[in-house]
Image (cartoon, rainbow, N blue to C red):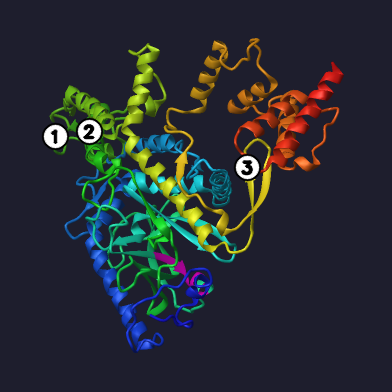
Amino acid sequence: MTKSKNLNPYHEKVEKNASMCAKKEPDNSAKITQEFADDVVASVKADFAERQKMRRPYELNWQLNMNFTMGNQYCGISPRGSIEQEDKYYFWQEKQVFNHIATIVETRMSRLNRVRPKAIARPFSSSDSDVNSAKLSTKILNSARENIHLDEIVTRATAWSEVCGTAFYKVSWNPDQQEATVTVCSPFEIYPDSNVTASIDDCTSLIHAKVYSSSEVKDAWGVDIAGDTIKVFAIDGAASVGGLGYNTVVPSIVQEAKNDQVLVIERYTKPTSAYPCGKLEIVAGNQLLYYGELPYRLGDNDSYVYPFVKQVSVEQAGCFWGTSMVERVIPIQRAYNAVKNRKHEFLNRLAMGVLTVEDGSVDTDNLEEEGLSPGKILVYRQGAVKPSLMDSGDVPSDFTYEEEQLLKEFNDISGVSEFARKSTTPSQVTSGVALQLIAEQDDIRLAGSVDSIKRCIKRISQYILRMYKQFVSNAKLMRYADGQNSAELFYFTASDVGSDDIVFETENELSDSPATRRTMLFDLLNAGILSDSEGKLSASAKAKVLSAMGFANWESAQDITQMHIARAQRENVDIDHAEVLPVDDHALHIEEHTRQVIAGDIDEVDKTYRAKILAHIEEHKQVMKENV
């Protein structure tokens, strides 16, 4: 269909950079008419309502998981299809919550938050042009990662996936700032066309429903739409729409009603023969905000795909949605609360006692109000049976046994051992090897969640590079910092982004922690592997060891070493203006310049550049001889 600017204000920003696709259009489609727009709005809203009904059972489970994680554990899914509170049968019943689910989620989150692999672009070949392109792509990724705060975004998404089982990332382009952006979408916002598709790419269409304020809609699309009161769910500060059209009884810590809100529905349709670039329809209220092709070419070979990435806690075969450990341990948590509360009720009976009195023998109102306080004078009717405490017996040992078994079941089903939750070593385990095996077993149970996070980071990194490749038409300035007090400003254009083959520097972030790396470095130092032929550790090697251990700027002597290395690297870039100074550490300079020559970064054709570096090295050697 031909775009209409008055109906597609959002598209005006996108079409400046996105290439146009030829579509098979009706003969009378010179422009989008109001009648056609009304039909699209009706179609999208009807499709959205149908998907809500299909997804309703999963949504109820997510709400239940959120309630149990936040401590509201006396609620359940009613036959009417809503979350309802459970009342006490008797006023004296204990209904305390002993929340082990929260500690399980916190422990899993703390371990998963260590999974932040650094993505690097791999060159397609060993040619200099491909190697340099891969290095530039890696710098772009590192800069974009800091700009969008990717680590924080992954943490928020992991909070959703650990509680609800699934979370989503949405990669988009900010045309005003010329930057790629990544936002977190909760499972409440995403509506696939089928709940039994394996992945996002298998969906024929996908709906993203998100709540905005009316002012945000005005700023983004230039359309005035009256706001309404809409219920949203929140975890860790992120709000998402859910339960539209249903009466749900949940506590305020999970659900909140927000005023002046507009529900914006985005329906993405994958490319077909009729629409080779796919189709995107955006509806808010009764208005069509956008109608056109998919705006982003994020797939392989510049193909049009959905700009979403799915993260799951535990994969479910034959299901679009992942499952959560919270869902698995809810029955155990219910049983544990019941056992603990019944046990406390029994203890209350033993401590407070149950007093039996003959009818009319004592003032029962006074007993109910004051009880049997120490030193109390209890007056009963002459000739009546003396009041006495009922024998309640002892607390059955079955309570304690069942409590211990339930605690073991928490560990077995959640995969989080007491070693990880309590951060204490088991009293019966004293071997270091045994403790290492326990830690590795915890890592094995998290392997599925770790792999999902890594796949998401890899896919997001690819999408970011493809965004810049699609939209950066003019030279763009970015800043790259290496984490060692060194920063670099560089320019690039879309043609410079030639590599989007992403790999990670480390394979297992859970085992490759700073502590293990330091231990390995100490072992290498003790073995003499890092020493030279004379058994000494060069200044350059010392600087690299301290940098790897996190002490790059530990002392001023090493600061000077790093400055010499950085100066030599700058000279490699601008060899025409390089000069030998009396204060230079000539050994470090010679080592860095030699590395530049033999590392393969110099074009074989550029003999002049190679000759200049070799001549500069000879100058350093000459000065060293003169100073001896």
**Contact between labelled residues 3 and 1, with CB atoms less than 8 Å apart:** no
| Relative vertical location of residue 25 with respect to residue 409 in this rendering, above or below | below
**Contact between labelled residues 2 and 1, with CB atoms less than 8 Å apart:** no
Q: CA distance from mark 1 to mark 2?
A: 34 Å
**Residue 534: where, in percent of width, then height?**
65, 10
User: Who's the residue at 38% across and 67% down the image?
Assistant: 230
Instruction: Indicate which disc, 1 or 3, sits on the residue closer to the N terminus.
Output: 1
Magenta-drawn segment:
210-218
Instruction: Indicate which disc, 3 or 2, sits on the residue closer to the N terminus.
Output: 2
Tag of residue 568: none
Q: CA distance from mark 3 to mark 2?
A: 74 Å
| Camera-nearest residue between 347 and 584 | 584
Q: CA distance from mark 1 to mark 3?
A: 106 Å
Which residue is tagged 2? 339
Tag of residue 358: 1
| Label 2 crowd (10 A; few <14 / some 14-19 / many >=20) | some
Is label 3 in a helix, a strand or a loop? loop
Which residue is tagged 3? 603
Indicate the quadrant containing the C terminus: top left, top right, bottom left or bottom right: top right
**Contact between labelled residues 2 and 3, with CB atoms less than 8 Å apart:** no
Q: Amino acid at mark 1?
A: Glu
